[in-house]
Every structure is written in structure tokens, then in C-alpha cells.
């Protein structure tokens, strides 16, 4: 049963989506105090707002569902949901339970689900708790506290319940957080609050996260502890902040790229803006690379756009590495280097001649050095001599030395005699040459010993 339900979790999520996001704007559904819940009156509907299902195309399916659920006045039970073998019908039954429940009946449903949890799944419990959190956050959180066993399950349940609560009553959910003694549990539940707020008001969720992050930064700075402990605390803060921001970015993207890009642009300068640009650019580029490229180009001279430039370049490079390299090369120098490296690698693999011709026309710059390094690193396996010539043209001393060193080690594995003849005039220092030769000799000695041992058998 669990396997069937997991395979169809997407269907179930869609069926409940309107309820989980929008129920806060509607009145509570009526119902009895019993665990059993009456099905909706519309016999052929999949949800309260669905169509009647009278078309010929779905008549058979609708009739089967109605036979399973019964006619008006019959009741849907948790047991009926858990025992149904058809995944479509099981999810329909569960949707009826959630869409029809009220605050008075939720507790009974919870106890039945908890008692027979092995037959269901954590996803169903999470969806139920999120819905209950919207109806009665306090009761839902009290119920979560009774879940025993795996702490991860209790954490997931808490996130689900408080996210539903925060989607309808964020201040109430935040007030509950102040009653939680455990710092770890508060951190977990905070993620749920952000998730719930983001589902209904992403901008308000953003303000909350920014306020929370500043408080935590101040606490870390004022902590009376060793530097190592303070660094550990700050890493934890940064990790939580990153997850919260990702949740909000996802919610903004769901509202459309125009909304998402405006949100990112209006964030305060610093790591939050850089992270937001990174996430938005990644998703934007996967949907519309050309439009994403234009958006990122308008911010490419800013530090916060550095990762966004790389995201767009990577996506452009999947289809056309040459286009990606040329796009990056036209950007301001500040954010070119790292983005052009990955694009040049792909272009070199596809067409090393064209990539080399492009490099010949590039003016000396940090970006050219980065591109040449990628070109040489990609080329050294097939043409180490050519790779060495290109590596020697890198202007930056340290980068040139690192690239030549890599080419030399690759070359000496493939063509020891040729590499040894080239090394004295390579431009590498005497110490570097000595280490390269010493390592090569050790590898050869190991191979010789292995070969001899095989011959003795």
C-alpha cells in the first residue's frame, strides 16, 4: 500500500493544493465530532470545486469512484483509505478526508492515522498535519508532541503542522515558537513557519527571515565562547538562512519570473542578494536561457551576480558552448573568469580548433587567462604539446605555473620521453621539474614491480 501511495503523491498534492494554500481565505467546512467524515455532496466531483464529471470520457472512472465512496450520506473512513488497493481511489478517499474535515474531527483522524501509520506514509501524515495546522494550529502541535519513536518523523510532523498554522496565522505560529525550550526544535520549526508564510505571502516571509537572521548574527557575535564554537554557530546560522531563502525563492518563482526577479533585485546588498540571484538565475535559465541571459547581463557588473552569471553560462553551454563563451566574454571583467572557464571546457571538447581560434583573438585579461587554462587542461590529454604552448601564454604567473604543472604531469604519463625533453625549457622552476620527474619515476617503479610480480606467478 505504501508503495502505491508514494508513487501517486504528486496526484494527491495537486488534489489538495488549493486547500493547503487557500483555505485560510475560506470558511471552515462543516462536519460532525466523529472520526468518520461525510463525503462531499457532488457525486462526480474530484474536489469541492471540481466539475461534475458527466462527460463520456470520464464517466466510467467517475462511476467506479462513486461506487467506492458510496452515495450521498455515506461516510469515508481512515480505514477505507488505508485498505484501498487502487492508488487513485486511495488518494481520492484521502482527499475527501482532508477536504471535509473540521477542527472537531481532526483529532480523531490523527489518532487513526497514527495508530495505523505503517499502512500509510509519512507524506499523507504531513499533508494531514498541514491541513490541521490551518484549522487549529495549537491542537495540531499538541498532537505532534505525542508522536514517539524516530525523532526525524516528529520533526517532519512539526514542520508540516506549523507551516499550515503559519500560512493562516503567522503571528500565532511565531508566538508558539517562543514556548519551545529546545534550541534545535525551534530551528526546525522556524523552517516550517517560513514555508507556511512563503506559501501565502513571500514578501512577509522575506521580512521575517531578514529580521531573524540579523538577530542570530548578533547572538553569534555576542556569544561568550571560543572562536571555534562561534564559527560553528555561524555556519549553522548560515545553513538555516540558506534553506529559508531557498524556500522563499521557490515561492516567488511560482508566482512568475517577473515577480521573482523583482524580488531578488529589491533585496539588500550582500550574501542574501547573491543567493537569491543564484537561485532565480538557475531556474530562469532552465526555462528561458535567452531571457535569463538578458536579465543577468543587466546586473553582471555587480558582485552579487557572480554566481548568477555562472548559472546562465552553464545553461547556455549545454546547448551551445560557443554561444556561452561569447556571451560571458561580452560581460564586464569582474564576473567573467569563473564563468568562462566552465564554458570553455565544453567548447574545447566539442570543437578545439574553433575554441583555439577564439582565444587567439581575445585581448589579454584575467578572463583570457582563465579561458586558456581551461582550454589547456582539456587539451592536455590529446595534444599535450599544444596544451603546453597555450599554457605558456597565460599572463598571470601563478596561474601559468599551475597550468604548466598540470600539463607536464599529464604529458609525462602519456609520453615520458617527449615530456622529459620538453621540461627543461618549459618555464617551470627547477624544484617543480624535479618533483614531476620524481613522481613519474615512482609510478614507473611501481608499475615495474607489479609487472614482475605478475610474471612470477
Image (cartoon, rainbow, N blue to C red):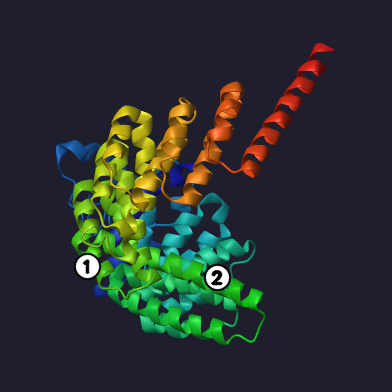
Decide which of tag 1 and tag 2 comes sooner along the chain. Answer: 2
Residue 266, horizontal then vertical, whole percent: 25, 73
Q: Residue at x 45, y 25 (%)?
A: 383
Under circle 1, the secondary element is helix
Q: Is residue 137 above or below residue 343?
A: below
Name the quadrant containing residue 151.
bottom right
Which image quarter holds the C terminus? top right
Q: Which mark is residue 262?
A: 1
Task: Report if residue 210 is visible in the image.
Answer: yes
Which residue is denoted by mark 2 in the rendering? 236
Q: Residue furthest front?
A: 425
Residue 94, horizontal then vertical, whole percent: 39, 55
Q: Is residue 42 left or right of residue 164?
A: left
Q: Is residue 123 left or right of residue 91?
A: right
Residue 413, horizontal then vertical, whole percent: 60, 27
Q: Is residue 257 left or right of residue 359?
A: left
Amino acid at each position: 500500500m505504501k508503495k502505491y501511495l508514494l508513487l501517486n503523491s504528486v496526484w494527491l498534492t495537486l488534489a489538495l493544493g488549493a486547500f493547503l494554500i487557500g483555505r485560510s481565505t475560506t470558511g471552515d467546512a462543516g462536519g460532525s465530532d466523529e472520526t468518520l467524515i461525510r463525503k462531499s455532496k457532488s457525486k462526480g466531483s474530484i474536489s469541492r470545486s471540481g466539475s461534475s464529471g458527466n462527460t463520456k470520457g470520464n464517466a466510467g472512472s467517475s462511476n467506479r469512484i462513486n461506487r467506492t465512496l458510496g452515495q450521498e450520506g455515506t461516510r469515508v473512513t481512515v480505514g477505507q483509505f488505508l485498505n484501498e488497493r487502487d492508488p487513485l481511489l486511495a488518494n481520492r478517499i484521502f482527499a475527501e478526508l482532508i477536504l471535509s474535515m473540521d477542527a472537531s474531527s481532526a483529532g480523531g483522524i490523527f489518532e487513526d492515522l497514527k495508530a495505523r501509520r505503517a499502512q500509510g506514509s509519512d507524506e499523507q501524515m504531513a499533508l494531514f498535519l498541514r491541513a490541521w495546522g490551518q484549522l487549529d494550529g495549537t491542537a495540531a502541535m499538541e498532537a505532534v508532541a505525542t508522536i514517539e519513536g524516530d525523532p526525524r518523523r516528529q520533526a517532519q510532523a512539526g514542520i508540516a503542522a506549523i507551516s499550515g498554522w503559519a500560512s493562516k496565522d503567522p503571528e500565532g505560529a511565531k508566538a508558539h515558537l517562543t514556548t519551545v525550550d529546545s534550541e534545535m526544535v525551534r530551528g526546525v520549526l522556524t523552517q516550517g513557519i517560513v514555508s507556511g508564510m512563503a506559501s501565502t505571502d513571500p514578501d512577509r516571509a522575506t521580512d521575517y527571515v531578514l529580521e531573524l537572521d540579523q538577530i542570530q548574527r548578533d547572538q553569534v557575535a555576542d556569544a561568550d565562547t571560543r572562536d571555534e564554537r562561534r564559527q560553528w554557530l555561524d555556519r549553522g546560522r548560515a545553513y538555516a538562512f540558506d534553506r529559508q531563502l531557498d524556500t522563499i525563492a521557490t515561492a516567488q518563482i511560482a508566482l512568475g519570473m517577473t515577480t521573482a526577479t523583482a524580488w531578488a533585485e529589491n533585496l539588500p546588498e550582500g550574501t542574501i542578494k547573491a543567493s537569491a540571484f543564484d537561485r532565480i538565475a538557475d531556474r530562469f535559465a532552465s526555462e528561458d536561457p535567452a531571457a535569463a541571459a538578458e536579465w543577468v547581463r543587466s546586473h553582471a557588473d555587480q558582485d552579487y551576480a557572480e554566481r548568477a552569471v555562472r548559472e546562465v553560462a552553464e545553461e547556455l553551454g549545454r546547448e551551445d558552448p560557443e554561444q556561452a563563451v561569447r556571451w560571458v566574454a561580452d560581460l564586464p571583467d569582474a564576473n567573467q573568469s569563473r564563468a568562462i572557464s566552465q564554458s570553455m571546457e565544453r567548447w574545447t571538447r566539442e570543437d578545439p580548433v574553433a575554441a583555439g581560434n577564439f582565444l587567439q583573438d581575445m585581448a589579454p585579461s584575467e578572463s583570457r587567462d582563465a579561458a586558456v587554462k581551461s582550454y589547456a587542461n582539456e587539451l592536455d590529454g590529446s595534444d599535450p604539446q599544444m596544451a603546453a604552448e597555450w599554457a605558456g601564454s597565460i599572463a598571470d604567473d601563478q596561474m601559468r605555473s599551475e597550468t604548466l604543472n598540470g600539463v607536464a604531469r599529464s604529458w609525462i604519463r602519456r609520453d615520458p620521453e617527449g615530456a622529459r625533453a620538453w621540461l627543461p625549457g618549459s618555464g617551470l622552476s627547477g624544484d617543480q621539474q624535479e618533483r614531476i620527474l620524481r613522481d613519474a619515476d615512482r609510478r614507473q617503479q611501481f608499475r615495474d614491480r607489479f609487472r614482475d610480480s605478475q610474471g612470477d606467478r
